[in-house]
Image (cartoon, rainbow, N blue to C red):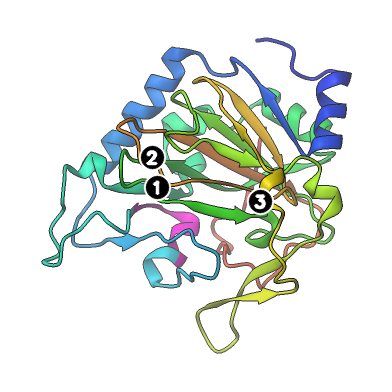
Amino acid sequence: MKNYINKINIENFENSGFCVLDNYFSEDICHKLINQANYLVKSTNLQTRSLFLAHEGSVNQDDYFMESSEKIHIFFEEDAFNLNGELNQDILLSVNKIGHALHELDPIFREFSTGQNLHNIANKFGKIKNPIAVQSMYIFKQPKIGGEVTFHQDSTYIHTKPSSVLGFWWALEDTNKENGCLWVLPGGHKKYPLKSKFVRNPSGGMEYEVYNKDPWPKEQFIPLEVPKGTLVLLDGLLPHGSNHNYSKISRHAYSLHVIDRFLPYSRQNWLQRSPKMPFKGLI
């Protein structure tokens, strides 16, 4: 495998809050993960379904969502169903994402979510001494209905003190502005402190604790149009997001989020594990 751990890449990540590592996955691996995701979708029970809303301020707090922290659950696009509750198109074109324990429970995804290479990247880029994986997501970004993911910081949803979140984001298909590529705010991880936290409400459910309502400067975001197989590293405080996919082409991606095992993990985080299924290291 190509040596991605070098001074130039690490300095780029530290200064910009992101780093683009090309050709991390081969085309065969991309196809393998896409095929496995499609298999999981076709095997799902339509009687148990949940919509995923990725807009700032939306709160996914049903049991199906909360239990996904240690399961493999399927989440549908907001526009996937008609008024009668029937799918508007084939199920493979209706799913928003799969989450959030793919990296542990599915053998195919587990193979590519662990290993010395990922451990070393987390250690050198994220300065994470003992990286553990806390969640994984397979994002479909469907043609025409692939929903917008508004600008956000990953540390809003997974917070440690201090912040240690590092996002691994793999493009499994070519990405561009038309099919909803990532947009990032270079250097935003240094300039902008955490804007909000998605926390458990003591009385039940979830809510956002908002510390700053000022919008990020939209004109300063840049698109990351990358080919399939690319790995994008994202600092947990870096503002990023993606637009609605209005094109006829999907934009499949796989993401993994890691933190430092030895830093305090907030009990307010939405994503909690039972003692029988603790977070695991990358090696």
Label 3 crowd (10 A; few <14 / some 14-19 / many >=20): few
Q: Residue lying farthest bottom? A: 203
Q: Amino acid at mark 2?
A: Phe
Q: Position of residue 72 (x, y in %)?
A: 39, 50
Left or right of residue 281, residue 77 in this image: left
Residue highlighted by disc 2 = 140
Q: Is residue 191 above or below residue 247?
A: below
Residue that mark 1 sits on: 97
Eye-nearest disc, 3 or 2: 3
Residue 159, position as x, y percentages in the image: 72, 61
Up the image or down, 203 lies above or below 185; here it is: below
**Between 4 and 180, which is closer to the camera in this rendering?**
180
Mark positioned earlier in the residue sequence (3 or 2) = 2
Magenta residue span: 66-75
Residue 201: image location, x then y, percent: 59, 82
Q: Are marks 3 and 1 in contact (CB under 8 Å)?
A: no
Crowding near the residue tagged with mark 2, few <14, some 14–19, many ≥20 C-alpha atoms within 10 Å? many
Element type where label 2 sits in the image: loop
Tell me the residue that label 3 is attached to.
Answer: 218
Type of residue at label 1?
A: Lys
Left or right: residue 126 versus residue 26 is right
State which quarter of the image contains the C terminus: top right
What amino acid is found at the position of numbered circle 3 in the picture? Lys
Q: Residue at x 50, y 58 (%)?
A: 69
Q: Residue drawn 67% across and 43% down?
A: 221
* 149 sits left or right of 239 in the view: left
Q: Nearer the viewer, residue 283 or 77?
A: 77
User: Who comes first in sequence, dot 2 or dot 1?
Assistant: 1
User: Do the numbered discs 2 and 1 sit on residues whose CB atoms are within 8 Å?
Assistant: yes
Does residue 29 sit above or below 75 in this rendering? above
